[in-house]
């Protein structure tokens, strides 16, 4: 994450970012995304187009930044009492979120920009959520799988099948993916 | 796969497709992809721009079609004598291919177009290759994993980590992913 995309909270820079992100979200709900332009977003946000170009570079980079930002607005992690249950609950929500129209647009926005760090932020953020669930289990003295095993075994198949199909994963399939992570625990 | 993207081989339509695909590949090697335009490709292929628009719709759809087409030009499957060995050899080649500059561009082209069937063709094609390896093992009376388990356990993590990082998978990691598919075989 660099200073371009994470301005100091509360400053002028942060207010500009919030206004521009909100303008993108509002306009995305109102018009076809293919018709979105930087001048249109600037107008809605009350900034000049050059402010947007200077800060985000291109429209694709701006959309990707908004997509990454919306990731962090997630619900708190469900506590079922076991890591298996928590991961299954988390994975089902993650499946719903990523296969929704908003989630699919978000993934495509992140991948369409050439900012490798945007894609990375998604993976790091998701790994962070999983690690929190694992840490709760460790605190309860449960045997838990490694976070990398969960990324490979649960997150990767959900995203791969969402992007490449041939069909979306079912909730039952996702629960099985989580169970497999415990085979060698 | 529809008739738009799979013309009858040998016909005029197939010759146009071959010329346009070749034009895209040549131009991609010569100039920056961001500078590619439909009129430029039409000129190189000796067709009119409207031929391209009529057949492929948009530049993104054309690039995605070329990307899917290049998938099929693969090397034959290595025969090591065991399914474990064959899958490991296949997965290492797949890793090399997909994490190369050409492979990354191909994936981004496929995902950038809104043709869901293009992404699906990739997954179906890869599953077909894996099934061939499994079928050889079945013919040798080996116990083999299900193709879906290999898609989730090997293909998905390779693609997820290539797209979202934070780092590319190592060859050793890919071999481990393949071994895990045999845990319950």
Image (cartoon, coloured by chain):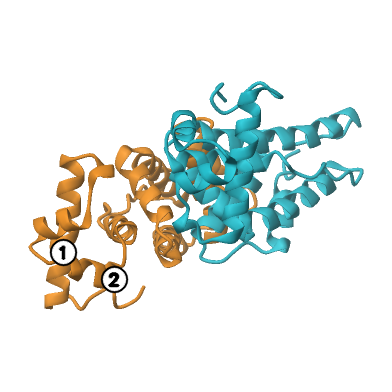
Chain colours: A cyan, B orange
On what subunit does the disc labeled 1 rest?
B
Q: Neighbour class for label 2 at 10 Å: few (<14), some, many (≥20)? A: some
Q: Furthest-left residue in view?
A: B46
Q: CA distance from mark 2 to mark 1?
A: 11 Å
Relative vertical location of residue B53 with respect to residue A109 in this rendering, above or below: below
* Label drawn at residue B5: 2
Question: Which residue is at a point 18% across and 42% down the rendered structure image?
Answer: B29
Question: Which residue is at a point 38% across and 39% down the rendered structure image?
Answer: B99
Of B171 and A162, nearer the camera is: A162
Image spot of residue B141 (x, y percent): 48, 62
Question: Which residue is at a point 78% across and 33% down the rendered structure image?
Answer: A132
* Label drawn at residue B18: 1
Image spot of residue A138 (x, y percent): 84, 30
Image spot of residue B46 (x, y percent): 7, 63
The quadrant holding residue A16 is top right
Q: Neighbour class for label 1 at 10 Å: few (<14), some, many (≥20)? A: some
Quarter in which the C terminus of chain A is drawn: top right
Of A179 and B67, nearer the camera is: B67
* Mark 2, secondary structure of its residue: loop
Q: In this orientation, does residue B8 appear?
A: yes
């Amino acid at each position: 994450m660099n200073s371009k995309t994470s301005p100091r909270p509360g400053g002028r820079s942060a207010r500009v970012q919030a206004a521009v992100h909100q303008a993108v979200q509002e306009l995305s709900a109102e018009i076809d995304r293919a018709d979105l332009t930087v001048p249109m977003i600037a107008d809605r946000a009350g900034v000049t187009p050059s402010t947007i170009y200077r800060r985000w570079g291109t429209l694709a980079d701006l959309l990707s930044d908004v997509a990454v930002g919306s990731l962090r607005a997630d619900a708190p992690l469900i506590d079922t009492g076991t890591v298996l249950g928590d991961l299954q609950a988390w994975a089902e929500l993650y499946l719903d979120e990523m296969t929704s129209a908003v989630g699919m647009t978000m993934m495509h926005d992140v991948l369409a920009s050439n900012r490798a760090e945007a894609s990375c932020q998604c993976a790091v953020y998701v790994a962070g959520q999983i690690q929190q669930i694992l840490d709760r289990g460790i605190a309860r003295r449960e045997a838990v799988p490694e976070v990398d095993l969960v990324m490979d075994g649960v997150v990767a198949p959900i995203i791969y099948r969402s992007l490449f199909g041939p069909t979306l994963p079912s909730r039952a399939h996702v629960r099985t993916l989580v169970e497999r992570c415990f085979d060698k625990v």
